Image (tube, rainbow, N blue to C red):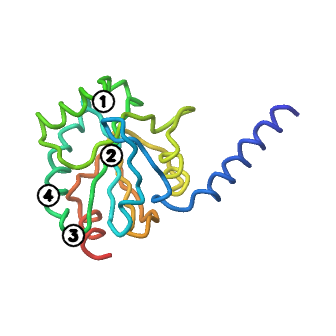
Amino acid sequence: MKTFTLILSFLFAGFLFAQDVQNFHQFTVNDISGKPYSLEQLNGKKVLVVNTASKCGLTPQYEDLEKLYQTYKEDNFVIIGFPANNFMKQEPGTNDEIAEFCRINYGVSFPMMEKISVKGDDIHPLYKWLTTASNTEIQWNFQKFMINPDGTLHGFVSPRTKPFDEEIISWIENQ
């Protein structure tokens, strides 16, 4: 009976969480320097949210993510990177080390946030919202979520989907 009550409590808490947070813009996260970054400032922009890692087979996607950002940033588009160490400990660095790695190796200029957890018991509230809203789990590093200018979730693509994939480009150009 205690187990049933505990499960029911978690489900109810999840329901309340889903009801309280309706929109991407309601979150404040910390940037890679540790400063608060209100996602409300992105109201009116399309946002590609990506969980990243520096020591992953998909890490070279940073290059195309930066090119995508440079191509569309003047069209109310932004990419936000969230380093995470959830998959085979492929993001072991500190925030300073991650920022330096991204800048030196890939010239990353899109906003990078502090390292967070994107799954498990310590999942960041933003990723809890993303996974609940999309009814999916984070599969691996470089999973991409597309956020509409009004802060609603448009959809997501798998980690192996490249930044210049037609689904992403079509969303950026046609919505």
Give the amino acid at mark 4: Gln
Q: Tag on residue 95? A: 1
Q: Which residue is mark 2?
A: 159
Give the amino acid at mark 1: Asn
Give the amino acid at mark 2: Pro
Q: Looking at the image, do the residues carrying marks 2 and 1 touch, with CB atoms under 8 Å apart?
A: no
Mark 1 neighbour density, 10 Å: few (under 14) some (14–19) many (20 or more):
some
Q: Earlier in the sequence, mark 2 or mark 4?
A: 4
Q: Nearer the viewer, residue 45 or 160?
A: 45
- Image quadrant for the N terminus? top right
Q: Nearer the viewer, residue 27 or 10?
A: 27
Q: Earlier in the sequence, mark 2 or mark 1?
A: 1
Give the amino acid at mark 3: Asp
Q: Tag on residue 70? A: 4
Q: Tag on residue 75? A: 3
Mark 2 neighbour density, 10 Å: few (under 14) some (14–19) many (20 or more):
some
Q: Give the mark toward the camera: 2 or 4.
A: 4
